[in-house]
Image (tube, helix red, strand yellow):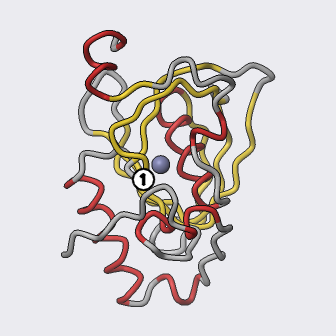
Amino acid sequence: MSILKIARMGHPILRRRARPVDLLELTTAPIQKLIDDMIATMKEYQGIGLAGPQVHEDLRLFVAGVENGDDPMPLTVIVNPALTLQGDTSVDDWEGCLSIPDVRGRVPRAPEIDVRGFDRQGKPLQFTARGMAARVIQHETDHLDGILFLDRMKTFESLAFIEEYSRFLAE
Ligand code: ZN
């Protein structure tokens, strides 16, 4: 497995709409290796999600998962996701991004979503996600549409560097 280079804010690939993954291509060795490398890269940099464009791949897929914390999420690979947001309200909470290092901000997201897509073998997926998982999946799916979490913030008042976030803002 390899640790991949992460595209940082300003790289044009982060602002493009990624192309759908051809399900026949999905099970080939290069894409399966890419998925393994994305999981290794996410863990190496202690992220909880990583989308194709963040590793310079023009593909609609992402990996996500968090092992510890109060709201763990199992390791998930989603290909060609389609989300339906549930409810009319949004919930603000902290987000960061491996493509925007060392920064945190509060982002409104739907608290519950219906997720459809495919797993890494091309098997159809459908489930409801809530809480942290719903937030991460919305953040990662945004990456596939060229959207960064800063675009979703209502104001920048909460924007903080991680060190100051840890000192003053972390709950
Ligand atoms: Zn991100």
Which of 70/141 is in front?
141
List the single residue furthest toward the right: 88
Q: Is residue 108 above or below residue 133?
A: above
Judge: label 1 CB < 8 Å from ligand 1: yes
Which of 154/45 is in front?
154
Q: What is the three-letter code of the residue carrying label 1?
A: Ser
Q: Secondary structure at mark 1?
A: loop
| Residue drawn at x 45%, y 63% as measured from the top left | 54
Q: Where is residue 115 drawn, in percent x and y? A: 64, 48
| Residue drawn at x 28%, y 70% as measured from the top left | 4
Q: Where is residue 37 drawn, in percent x and y? A: 28, 71
Q: Where is residue 98 drawn, in percent x and y? A: 37, 50
The count of marks equals: 1
Locate residue 118: give its quadrant: bottom right
Q: Is residue 152 left or right of residue 100?
A: right
Q: Quadrant of the image for the C terminus?
A: top left
Q: Where is residue 47 drawn, in percent x and y? A: 32, 46
For disc 1, the marked residue is 99
Q: Is residue 100 left or right of residue 66?
A: right
| Residue drawn at x 37%, y 79% as measured from the top left | 32
